[in-house]
Image (cartoon, helix red, strand yellow):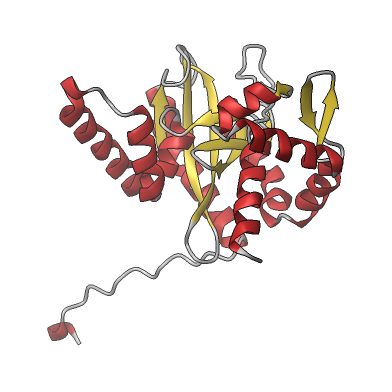
């Protein structure tokens, strides 16, 4: 594939990434502003996407085309993560009593790929396809803790202002160190007042954190005391799913001294 073809493909992906469950319909002008592509380039690529049924036009608005549904079905059927995560989310929902979900990275954001709603009356209403920031919430903090690229991007986009930058960055790094040590994250009212969350990493065979498992619920139920109680069990659940995906936890070092032989 030529360099020009790769660049065109990348621009098309930027256009398709503009569409979310919160913004399912966009005009060409809105797409241009979101992608920062030239007007003529945006119009040409949008027309190409419509011609190939990747976008659908209704008046002056566009939405994701029906052709993508076949890819969605194929991705769902072929994804080992999605195949394995269903029972795990049910387990986490029952452990915590709260809504559970699985998140993967998409660019500088995270997106929910599976959700199990709490059976209680007052619940966190998560949904599949929901796009959320990395810098707020336990799931984002886990990605930041185990991926330096995510951390740099999150700090650059939503970093503290100059007045308290050093102190806030020091606090953030201390929090991420704690997440790496204990294996789980807990946040309070970061994304929404009154909504607390917990999350653990999911690794692939190479050890890369490819997803997070999270639970979210009202602050009066998902308290720090509850987090301390269920955090270790959540970490074990994430490790079990990671092992199913091929990850092998490094063996503990042998601390015997030479003289003990």
Number of numbered discs:
0
Foreground residue, 3 or 176?
Answer: 3
Q: Position of residue 89 (x, y in %)?
A: 65, 39
Counting from the top left corner in percent of width and height, residue 240 is at 56, 55
- Out of 246 and 226, give the one closest to the viewer: 246
Above or below, 86 relative to 191: below
Left or right, 15 with respect to 72, comes to left
The quadrant of the picture occupied by the C terminus is: bottom left
Towards the viewer: 12 or 146: 12
Q: Within the image, what quadrant is residue 120 found in?
A: top right
Q: Which residue is located at x 69 percent, y 21 percent?
A: 119
Q: In this rendering, is residue 87 above or below 137?
A: below
Q: Please tell me in which quadrant of the rendered image residue 125 appears.
A: top right
Of residue 112 and residue 33, the one placed in the foreground of this image is 33
Q: Is residue 96 visible from the viewing direction of this image?
A: no
Quadrant of residue 138 within the rendered picture: top left
Which residue does the image show at 31% across and 41% down from the upper left?
176
Residue drawn 63% across and 22% down?
30
Considering every residue shown, the one lying at the far bottom of the view is 261
Please give the name of the residue rendered at 83% of the width and 47% of the height, measured from the top-left corner: 73
Q: Is residue 153 left or right of residue 238?
A: left
Residue closest to the far left: 259
The answer to whether residue 144 of the structure is visible from this angle is: yes
Which quarter of the figure is the N terminus placed in? bottom right
Q: Position of residue 251 (x, y in %)?
A: 39, 70
The x, y position of residue 158, in whole percent, is 36, 28
């Amino acid at each position: 594939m030529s360099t020009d073809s790769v660049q065109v493909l990348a621009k098309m992906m930027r256009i398709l990434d503009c569409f979310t469950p919160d913004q399912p319909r966009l005009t060409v002008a809105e797409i241009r502003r979101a992608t920062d592509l030239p007007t003529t380039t945006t119009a040409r690529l949008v027309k190409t996407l419509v011609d190939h049924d990747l976008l659908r036009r209704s008046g002056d608005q566009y939405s994701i085309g029906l052709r993508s549904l076949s890819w969605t079905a194929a991705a769902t059927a072929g994804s080992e993560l999605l195949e394995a995560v269903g029972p795990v989310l049910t387990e986490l929902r029952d452990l915590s009593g709260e809504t559970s979900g699985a998140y993967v990275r998409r660019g500088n954001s995270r997106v929910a790929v599976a959700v199990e709603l709490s059976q209680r009356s007052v619940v966190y209403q998560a949904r599949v396809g929901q796009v959320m920031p990395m810098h707020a919430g336990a799931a984002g903090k886990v990605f930041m803790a185990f991926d330096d690229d995510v951390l740099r991007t999150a700090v650059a986009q939503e970093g503290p202002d100059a007045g308290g930058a050093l102190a806030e960055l020091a606090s953030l790094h201390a929090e991420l160190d704690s997440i790496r040590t204990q294996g789980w994250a807990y946040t309070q009212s970061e994304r929404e007042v009154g909504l607390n969350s917990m999350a653990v990493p999911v690794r692939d065979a190479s050890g890369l954190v490819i997803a997070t498992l999270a639970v979210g619920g009202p602050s009066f139920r998902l308290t720090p005391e509850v987090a301390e109680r269920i955090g270790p069990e959540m970490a074990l659940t994430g490790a079990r799913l990671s092992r199913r995906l091929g990850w092998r936890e490094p063996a503990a070092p042998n601390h015997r001294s030479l003289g003990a032989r």
